[in-house]
Image (cartoon, grey):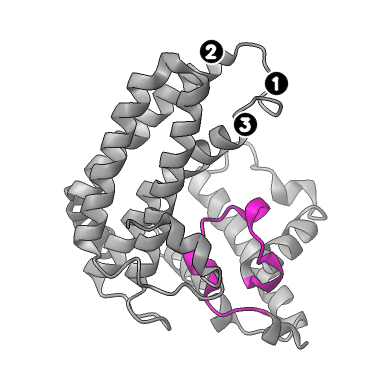
């Protein structure tokens, strides 16, 4: 199979970034490129990788992004791909190069205030705060238990992984919806919102497992589940067609996805 044909277009736009748990990494261009770049970055000279004494933080970040961008272009060219296929990174590079553009910053700040004022974001932010506190309490209850051998290690990993991702995906969905951003995929905001909804459902399952083992956090978990339910209601209100969105390459297992949807 030709390398380009091997990848499912836009699949990585609508995933949860949990590559270790993903069964489709072999079809993901983002995963392939990041692994290639990771291997190459380890060969970069120390003076390039490390921030020089007195070097401005933004200057160093832009320098490293420039190095990464050049490296990415080399990987793309060598494998017969096009930069258009990795437009997400390409856009990130362009945005970083525009740091200091006051008009653009003002526009983005206005959008940020609008998104922050939404009920979905305010509630998901509250959930993140409460979830972080509860997870820390669970770890204290575990004491010296190795987290890898904990009876609820998978559940803890799940709530930990999705704790911040819920708000990130909902934020992305709202940003694309409000900005009218054009992409190769129709109504992409529904796809981002769907990832957020899936994260909510999996988090709910994870917290229920945690509470089964640690009765001490049952009240905290009950509160978290109520907040998650409210977050879900607000996301569905903003994106009523989110569950119906077909994520490229990720929703082939209809049973698994359907099981997460509200009945």
* Direction from residue 39 to residue 58 in the image, left or right: left
Q: Which of the 4 image quarters holds residue 30?
A: bottom right
Per the image, is 19 magenta? Answer: yes
Report which residue position mark 2 lands on.
141
**Front-most of 84 and 102?**
84
Q: Provide residue 155's location: percent of width, then percent of height.
A: 55, 35
Q: Could you tell me if the residues under marks 3 and 2 are in contact, i.e. CB atoms within 8 Å?
A: no
Q: Provide residue 252's location: percent of width, then percent of height.
A: 55, 73
Per the image, is 254 magenta? Answer: no
**Front-most of 188 and 55?**
188
* Direction from residue 119 to residue 35 in the image, left or right: right
**Front-most of 216 and 187?**
216
Question: How many angstroms separate mark 3 from mark 2 (CA)?
Answer: 13 Å
Residue span colored magenta = 7-29
Question: How many angstroms separate mark 1 from mark 2 (CA)?
Answer: 12 Å
* Direction from residue 143 to residue 234 in the image, left or right: left
- Say few, some or many: other residues with alpha carbon within 10 Å of mark 2 (under 14 / 14 to 19 / 20 or more): few
């Amino acid at each position: 199979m030709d390398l380009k044909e091997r990848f499912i277009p836009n699949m990585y736009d609508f995933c949860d970034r949990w590559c270790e748990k993903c069964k489709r990494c072999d079809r993901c261009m983002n995963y392939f490129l990041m692994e290639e770049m990771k291997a190459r970055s380890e060969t970069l000279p120390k003076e390039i990788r490390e921030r020089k004494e007195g070097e401005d933080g933004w200057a160093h970040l832009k320098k490293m992004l420039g190095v990464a961008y050049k490296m990415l272009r080399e990987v793309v060219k060598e494998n017969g791909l096009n930069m258009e296929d990795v437009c997400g990174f390409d856009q990130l590079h362009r945005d970083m190069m525009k740091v200091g553009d006051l008009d653009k910053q003002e526009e983005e700040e206005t959008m940020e205030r609008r998104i922050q004022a939404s009920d979905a974001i305010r509630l998901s932010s509250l959930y993140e705060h409460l979830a972080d506190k509860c997870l820390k309490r669970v770890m204290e209850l575990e004491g010296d238990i190795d987290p890898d051998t904990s009876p609820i290690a998978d559940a803890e990993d799940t709530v930990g992984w999705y704790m911040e991702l819920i708000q990130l995906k909902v934020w992305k969905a709202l940003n694309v919806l409000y900005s009218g951003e054009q992409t190769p995929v129709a109504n992409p905001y529904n796809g981002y919102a769907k990832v957020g909804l899936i994260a909510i459902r999996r988090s709910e399952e994870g917290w229920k497992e945690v509470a089964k083992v640690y009765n001490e956090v049952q009240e905290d978990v009950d509160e978290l589940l109520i907040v998650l339910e409210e977050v879900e209601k607000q996301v569905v209100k903003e994106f009523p067609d989110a569950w119906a969105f077909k994520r490229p390459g990720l929703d082939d297992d209809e049973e698994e996805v359907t099981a997460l949807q509200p009945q």
